[in-house]
Amino acid sequence: MLTKIPAKKFVPHNTVCVFPHSLKLECDKLASEKSEMQRHYIMYYEMSYGLNIEMHKQAEIVKRLNGICAQVLPYLSQEHQQQVLGAIERAKQVTPPEMNSIIRQQLQAHQLSQLQGLALPMTPLPLGLTPPTLPSVSTSGGLFSLSSILASQAHLAKDEKAARDPPDNHRDEDGDKSD
């Protein structure tokens, strides 16, 4: 028996060249997508690593502040001890939305004080426009922001106290007390 040999189909020359070219383009496209995905992975990894480090820093700050509070607490009067313990318990229960609200209020107060310092008139926003809002605060970002707000408030309180209570002892330029 004779087997029939199938006839070859006629394929134009340019079609044969286009097919490998399209494969090469597809391969290049996939390679560029792969490198883009790797860049995204590295970016997210670095962000995650930075966030993890920031969380550890904040945890260390909290631990140190708790230690300071525990050391100072016995020296306070009973009334002040109760106030401090209440404030500490309240601080442990602050939620991210409350933190956002506090930060927003602090930012608005800061902007207002800057505007008053510049003596610029405050004009209302045009109808339909809303003031810019802060982005949502994550736990670590919120802790960082809250700690910086608390630090700035402590600094302001110290400045106000220094302004109210001038020092009693005046010193000469060389540091000796003048009598």
Image (spheres, rainbow, N blue to C red):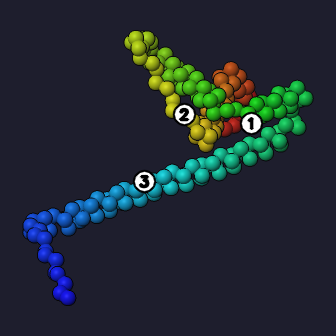
Tag 2 or tag 1, which sits nearer the N-term?
1
Q: Is residue 52 left or right of residue 38?
A: right
Is residue 149 at all visible to an observer of this figure?
Answer: yes
Q: Residue at x 55, y 54 (%)?
A: 49
Task: Judge whether residue 166 can be spotted in this image.
Answer: no
Say what secondary structure mark 3 lies in: helix
Q: Earlier in the sequence, mark 2 or mark 3?
A: 3
In the rendered structure, find residue 40 and report the number of the disc placed on it: 3
Which disc number belongs to residue 53?
none
| Image position of 176 (left or right of 120) | right
Q: Which residue is mark 1?
A: 92
Q: Earlier in the sequence, mark 1 or mark 3?
A: 3
The mark closer to the camera, 1 or 3, is 3
Q: Are marks 1 and 3 in contact (CB under 8 Å)?
A: no
Vertical comparison of 118 with 38: above or below: above
Q: Which mark is residue 136?
A: 2
Closer to viewer: mark 1 or mark 2: 2
Number of other residues with Cα within 10 Å of mark 1, as a class: few under 14, some 14 to 19, many 20 or more: few
Image quadrant for the N terminus?
bottom left
Give coordinates of residue 13: x percent, y percent.
Answer: 9, 69
Quarter of the image that includes the C terminus = top right
For the residue labelled by badge 1, is the local secondary structure a helix, a strand or a loop? Answer: helix
Instruction: Tell me which residue sits at (88%, 37%) in the image.
Output: 74
Q: Which circle, 2 or 3, is nearer the viewer?
A: 3
Snapshot quadrant of residue 130: top left
Residue at 9% from the left image edge and 67% from the top image edge: 12
Work out how far the residue at label 1 is from the one at label 3, CA to CA, in angstroms. 35 Å
Element class at badge 2: loop
Decide: marks 1, 2 in contact (CB < 8 A)?
no
* Residue 42 image point, x, y percent: 45, 57
Q: Quadrant of residue 31?
A: bottom left
